[in-house]
Amino acid sequence: MNIKRLNWPLWTGFLLTLAAFLSYFFIFVLFPFTRDFPWANLVLFVIAGVLLFMGLRRGFASDRPHPTRSKIVSSIVSVLSLAVIAMFVFVIFVGGRSLPASKGAPQVGQRVPEFSLPDTTGKTVSLNELLTTPINGKAPKGVLLVFYRGYW
Amino acid sequence: MSKFNEAGIRPVAISTDTSEDSRKLAQSQGYTFPILSDHSADVIRRYDLAHKGAGINGEDIARPAEFLIDSTQTAVWINLTENYWIRATPEQVLDVAKLLK
C-alpha cells in the first residue's frame, strides 16, 4: 500500500476511539476529577469523531485507487468506531446506574448493625473492636465503612 | 491514610472477596487499613447493600456504599451512589469527620 494513499484520518480516528474507550478504565477512573464525569474521554471521542468524518469523506472521494474497497473499509471502520462510542456511553451512563435501591440500608442517625468478619489474616474482627481499638494511642472518633464491589 | 489517622477515623473496606484475595490486594497497593471479607455477603445483606447476581459468577456482591459511624455505632454520614462510576472522595469524608467529637 502506498503510504500517501493511506487513509490516515480514518485509522487515526479509529485508534483514538479505542484509546478513548480504554483510557477511562485504565487511567481516568483513578482520579475522581476525570472519573465522576468522563469529560476527558468525551473530548477524545469528539476529536476521534472529527478524524473519522474526514476519513469517511476521503474514503468516498473519487480519486481513490480502489474506490469500492475504500468505501467499504471506511464505512466499516466508522460504524465500528461509533459502536465503541455507544458502548462507552452505555457502560458509564446506563450500566453504572444498574444498582439496587437499598431502601433498608442504615440511615443517618440510626445505629448500624453489629458484625464480625475475617480480616486479611483470617482473624475475626468485630465492628465494636474497630470502634474501640486505639489509632495512634487515641480512641477512634469513628469508623468509615466502605462497601465495594470487589475484584472477584 | 495519615489524614484519616489524624482525624481519628478508621477506614474499613468490606467486600465479598476472600481474605486471601484482599491480602494480595492490600499487599500490591500498600493498603494498611483493615479489609474484611464477607464472602457469603451476610453482612452486606444485613445492611441491604446486596447487588443480586452482579458478581462474575452470578453471586451477590456489595453495591458501592460508604458509612461514617461515630463511637456510639451511629451512622453520621452516608453515601449510596446511584452510579457506580461516581464515588465519594476522601476529602468529602474528612470534611464530615471534623464534626465528630
Image (tube, coloured by chain):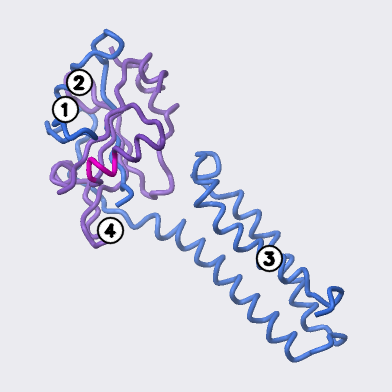
User: Left or right: A18 with respect to A127?
Assistant: right
Residue extent of the magenta highlight: B18-22
Q: Nearer the viewer, mark 1 or mark 3?
A: 1
Q: Give how far apart the Cα atoms at labels 4 and 1 are.
A: 26 Å
User: Left or right: A23 with respect to A75?
Assistant: left
The residue where tag 3 is placed is A49
Image colour for chain B is purple
Q: Which chain is blue?
A: A
Q: Label 2 crowding class (10 Å Cα cut-off): few <14, some 14-19, many 20+?
A: many
The residue where tag 1 is placed is A127
User: Left or right: A42 with respect to A101?
Assistant: right
- Which amino acid, mark 3? Gly
Output the chain of dot 1. Answer: A
**Image coords of residue A79 (percent x, y):** 61, 77
- Which amino acid, mark 4? Ala
- Which amino acid, mark 2? Leu
Q: Label 4 crowding class (10 Å Cα cut-off): few <14, some 14-19, many 20+?
A: some
User: Pointers 2 and 3 in contact (CB under 8 A)?
Assistant: no
